[in-house]
Image: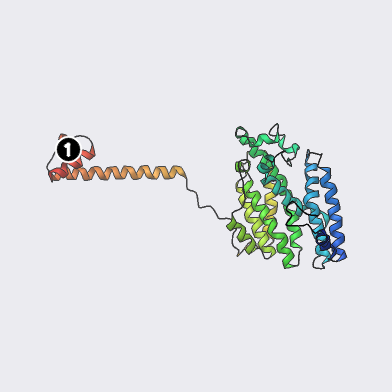
């Protein structure tokens, strides 16, 4: 059998031979997860994501099961203890929900048909149709809906920290930790950000490189989660419908990070804002400075006039004319 390009024949014996070459324990884990994932994704071909339960179920099939499968593979390798299904599922859901939130515009503009993964139970509180969120006149409602979605994703953070804190293999730890840090960083950028509905929002390459380079131990994860949760927390508008819930979840994670004792002697992932000065004080300062300058200028002009033996009463009222007149006589 050949593909569309006859120069590249498809040799399925090599494709099927790959999984057959690994240990039976690994084969069983992959086979089980693949079957369950396929059946679950098929279920949503004709079924829309209506409720939050549907949303969690869909994310479970496409990502949560990956978490379960990886946990089984890690355990089969004898490098890790077997993690609970709940924690493994949360690892997948946190990543998948982040992708769904970030990729709203790409998914809604998909041709020939939009891909709609945001649950109706959430977006219907703000607009009549999911695609209405990208319209400029719905900007305020769109951001509120976005914040609702991010707040929903934050519920998985504690499980993710618990899962990663139990990992023992350095290689497996980095494999799991780096994507999770990228996820919380992406959510921090997306939160309260209308650009999610206008274009692409993602972490800068330099920051991504820092995450990859610095993530070596659980202390690095605690530090990153603390930094990005602080960044996200600073963007929470207290008037937002889900502000209380978002702040509660962020503060719970920050508490875990603080209690880990890992927040000292570390490099921050987030550039701290410079101190902000009161604008009224700045304006007052410049007004006073202007008055002083005007006073000194007037005295200087009067001095020039007196030196030139010219009466100020005989001169025009504008200081610039005073200066020209006195300089001309000199």
Residue at 60% over, 32% down: 137
Residue 80 placement (x, y as % from top left) = 80, 65
Q: Nearer the viewer, residue 149 or 62?
A: 62
Q: How is the image coloured?
A: rainbow
Residue designated by label 1: 312
Q: Check disc 1 and report its element: helix, strand or loop.
A: helix
Residue at 16% over, 35% down: 313
Q: Is residue 276 above or below residue 319?
A: below
Q: Is residue 207 above or below residue 78?
A: above
Asked whether the viewer can see residue 26, the reply is yes
Image quadrant where residue 127 sits: top right
Residue 42 placement (x, y as % from top left) = 83, 45
In the picture, the quarter occupied by the N terminus is bottom right
Looking at this view, name the residue that lies furthest to the front.
6
The 10 Å Cα crowd at callout 1, few under 14, some 14 to 19, many 20 or more, is: few
Residue 22 placement (x, y as % from top left) = 83, 65
Asked whether the viewer can see residue 83, the reply is no
Residue at 69% over, 57% down: 179
Q: Is residue 223 above or below residue 125?
A: below
Q: Nearer the viewer, residue 251 or 199?
A: 199
């Amino acid at each position: 059998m050949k593909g569309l390009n006859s120069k590249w024949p498809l040799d399925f014996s090599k494709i099927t031979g790959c999984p057959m070459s690994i240990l039976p324990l690994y084969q069983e884990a992959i086979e089980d997860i693949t079957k369950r994932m396929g059946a679950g994704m098929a279920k949503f071909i004709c079924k829309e994501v209506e409720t939050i339960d549907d949303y969690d179920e869909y994310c479970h099939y496409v990502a949560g099961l990956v978490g379960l499968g990886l946990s089984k593979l890690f355990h089969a390798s004898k490098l890790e203890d077997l993690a609970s299904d709940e924690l493994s599922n949360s690892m997948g859901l946190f990543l998948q929900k982040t992708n769904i939130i970030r990729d709203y515009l790409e998914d809604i503009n998909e041709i020939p048909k939009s891909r709609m993964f945001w649950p109706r139970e959430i977006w219907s509180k703000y607009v009549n149709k999911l695609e209405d969120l990208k319209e400029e006149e719905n900007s305020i409602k769109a951001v509120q809906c976005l914040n609702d979605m991010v707040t929903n994703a934050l519920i998985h953070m504690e499980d993710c920290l618990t899962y990663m804190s139990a990992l023992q293999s350095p290689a497996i730890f980095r494999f799991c930790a780096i994507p999770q840090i990228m996820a919380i960083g992406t959510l921090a950028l997306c939160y309260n950000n209308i650009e999610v509905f206008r274009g692409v929002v993602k972490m800068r390459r330099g920051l991504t490189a820092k995450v990859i380079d610095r993530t070596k131990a659980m202390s690095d994860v605690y530090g990153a989660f603390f930094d990005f949760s602080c960044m996200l927390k600073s963007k929470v508008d207290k008037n937002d419908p889900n502000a209380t819930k978002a702040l509660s979840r962020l503060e719970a994670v920050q508490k875990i990070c603080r209690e880990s004792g890992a927040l000292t002697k570390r490099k921050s992932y987030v550039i701290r804002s410079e101190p902000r000065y009161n604008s009224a004080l700045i304006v007052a300062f410049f007004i006073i400075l202007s008055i002083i300058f005007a006073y000194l200028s007037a005295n200087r002009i009067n001095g020039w006039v007196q030196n030139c033996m010219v009466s100020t009463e005989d001169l025009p009222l504008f200081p610039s004319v005073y200066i020209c007149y006195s300089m001309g006589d000199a």
